[in-house]
Image: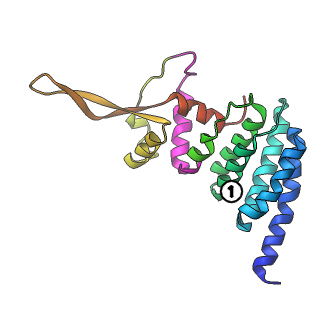
């Protein structure tokens, strides 16, 4: 047997108990068990050990919360398990596991299918910046967002990273207003950044349940 086949078999063997652990933790055995079929066919074996680690970590977190659980929708589960294992960064792996935990413990439908795609298009430093802003930003349902000066972000990310976060809809760029000699106002230099409501809810979903 080739080394590649040996690794594939080993990875598949690691995944099955991880799926079982997550299924048991969430109390939704059949929907999660059925996922093993398409996991084997759809995702390359190199992802399987990472999927196993993510599911095991999520199962531990679910049990720690003591919160009631429900089945994660097949579409959301697939999206998380397809993109999450591609992240090698430990902090990003924790965010993926938290996303899975919140999908199983928050009210059904509270975790949009867009969240895994947003997280998959983000660098660790960008996610860290969002965490920093989230800690400074009140719940949008309770208070109005305030702009955070660019000086609090430049040590983490550069301008292209800010544009990426803006493209993803989780960050808003705030620019100064300039007035020309004719009295017409136009956008000036970057004055600061602020989370969007989408960004605030997204970061919350990537953190452990409160």
Residue neighbourhood size for the residue with mark 1, other residues' Cα within 10 Å, grouped as few (<14), some (14–19), many (≥20): many
Measuring from the top left, give residue 116's x and y in whole percent.
63, 45
Q: As drawn, is 197 to the left or to the right of 181? A: right
Q: As drawn, is 142 to the left or to the right of 61? A: left
Q: Which residue is disc 1 drawn over?
A: 85
* Residue at the farthest left position: 181
* Quadrant the N terminus occupies: bottom right
Q: As drawn, is 161 to the left or to the right of 117? A: left
| Range of residues picked out in magenta | 120-143
Name the residue located 83 percent from the left edge and 69 percent from the top edge. 10
Please, is residue 141 above or below residue 131 in the view? above
Measuring from the top left, give residue 4's x and y in whole percent.
75, 78
Name the residue located 89 percent from the left edge and 46 percent from the top edge. 30
Q: How many marks?
A: 1
* Residue at the farthest top position: 142
Rendered image quadrant of residue 82: bottom right
Please, is residue 96 above or below residue 112 in the view? below
Question: Is residue 137 one of those drawn in magenta?
Answer: yes
Q: As drawn, is 113 to the left or to the right of 1? A: left
Question: Is residue 140 one of those drawn in magenta?
Answer: yes
Measuring from the top left, give residue 95's x and y in whole percent.
66, 44
Name the residue located 71 percent from the left edge and 36 percent from the top edge. 208
Q: Give the SS element for disc 1.
A: helix
Name the residue located 40 percent from the left edge and 44 percent from the top edge. 163
* Quadrant the C terminus occupies: top right
Measuring from the top left, give residue 8's x and y in whole percent.
79, 71
What colour scheme was applied to this rendering of the protein?
rainbow
């Amino acid at each position: 047997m080739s080394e590649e086949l040996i690794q594939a078999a080993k990875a598949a063997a690691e995944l099955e108990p991880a799926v079982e652990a997550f299924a048991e933790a969430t109390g939704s055995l059949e929907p999660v068990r059925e996922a093993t079929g398409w996991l084997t066919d759809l995702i390359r074996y190199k992802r399987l050990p990472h999927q196993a680690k993510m599911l095991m970590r999520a199962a531990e977190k679910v049990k720690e919360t003591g919160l009631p659980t429900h089945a994660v929708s097949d579409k959301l589960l697939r999206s998380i398990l397809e993109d999450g294992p591609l992240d090698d960064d430990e902090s990003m792996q924790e965010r993926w596991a938290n996303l899975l935990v919140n999908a199983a413990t928050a009210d059904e439908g509270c975790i949009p299918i867009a969240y895994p795609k947003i997280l998959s298009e983000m660098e660790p430093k960008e996610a860290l910046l969002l965490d920093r802003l989230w800690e400074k930003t009140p719940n949008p349902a309770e208070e109005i967002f305030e702009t955070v000066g660019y000086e609090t972000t430049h040590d983490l990310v550069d301008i292209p990273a800010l544009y990426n976060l803006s493209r993803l809809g989780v960050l808003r760029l705030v620019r100064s207003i300039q007035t020309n000699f004719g009295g017409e106002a136009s956008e000036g230099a970057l004055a600061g950044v602020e989370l969007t409501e989408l960004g605030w809810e997204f970061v919350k979903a990537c953190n452990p349940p409160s």
